[in-house]
């Protein structure tokens, strides 16, 4: 059964949410897992693509947008509509979309990243309730400022 983790940030900005997503993506990839970042829309996906290149000057996290030529050969994919191809061997997903994608259960782990923006809080409360109603194990992680 898919394990669900909610990372609850004290900050209110999208930038803080994306910065944490990058750090978490790096940690997951470093452990040898293939990862998919599910963005809200194409604009967020492209912003994530940019931020992954610059979030740390001493870091390099190979990544590509789903559907690009490079997507098959990198440990991290970014998309906003479709899941990565079923044969990509992706084990984890960071969900930055307000809703839960129908195909979330194909992953071993799903991380939901929450900041203190009211729209995000409202959407992710619905997600939490949906996962719990369906019987998925949900674990909250309350992070401190600057984490």
Image (cartoon, grey):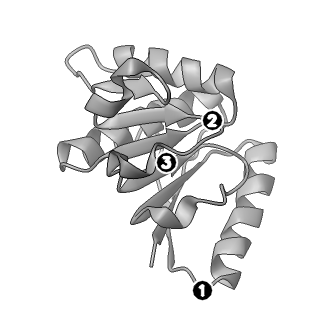
In this rendered view, identify the residue nearer to me: 127 or 64: 64
Q: Position of residue 47 (x, y in %)?
A: 56, 19
Query: What residue is shown with label 3?
Result: 94
Distance between the alpha carbons at the discs numbered 1 and 3: 20 Å
Q: As drawn, is 133 to the left or to the right of 93?
A: right
| Residue 120 spot, x, y in % from top left | 73, 46
Residue bearing mark 2: 80
> In percent of the image, x 44 and y 79: which residue is there?
1
Task: Find numbered disc 3 in the image and state the secondary structure of the residue it sits on.
Answer: strand
For the point 23% across and 21% down, which residue is it? 60
Q: Residue 35, percent across and down?
A: 37, 45
The residue mark sitting in front, 2 or 1, is 2
Q: Residue at x 77, y 54 (%)?
A: 123
Within 10 Å of the Cα at label 3, are there few (<14), some (14-19), or many (20+) other Cα atoms? many
Vertical position of residue 62 compared to residue 143: above or below: above
Residue 135's tag is: 1
Q: Give the class, few, some or many, for how many residues have Cα within 10 Å of label 2's Cα (few <14, many ≥20).
A: many
| Residue drawn at the location 80% of the way across and 46% of the way down | 118
Which is more foreground, mark 3 or mark 2? 2
* Earlier residue among tags 3 and 2: 2
For marks 1 and 3 on the same chain, the one whose residue lies earlier in the sequence: 3
N-terminal-most mark, 2 or 1: 2
* Element type at mark 1: loop
Spatial separation of the CA atoms under disc 3 and disc 2: 11 Å
- Category of crowding for the residue at label 1, using alpha-carbon neighbours closer than 10 angstroms: few (below 14), some (14–19), many (at least 20): few
Which residue is most to the front?
87
Residue 125's x, y, as percent? 74, 63
Q: Secondary structure at mark 2?
A: loop
């Amino acid at each position: 059964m898919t394990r669900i983790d909610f990372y609850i940030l004290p900050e209110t900005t999208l930038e803080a949410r994306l910065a944490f997503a990058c750090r978490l993506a790096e940690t997951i990839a470093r452990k040898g897992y293939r990862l998919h970042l599910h963005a809200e829309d194409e604009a967020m996906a492209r912003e994530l693509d940019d931020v992954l290149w610059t979030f740390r000057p001493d870091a390099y996290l190979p990544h590509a947008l789903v559907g690009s030529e490079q997507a098959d050969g990198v440990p991290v994919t970014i998309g906003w509509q479709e899941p990565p191809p079923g044969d990509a061997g992706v084990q984890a997903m960071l969900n930055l979309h307000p809703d839960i994608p129908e195909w979330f259960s194909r992953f071993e782990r799903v991380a939901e990243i929450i900041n203190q923006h009211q729209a995000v809080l409202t959407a992710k409360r619905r997600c939490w309730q949906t996962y719990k109603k369906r019987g998925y194990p949900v674990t909250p992680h309350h992070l401190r400022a600057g984490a």
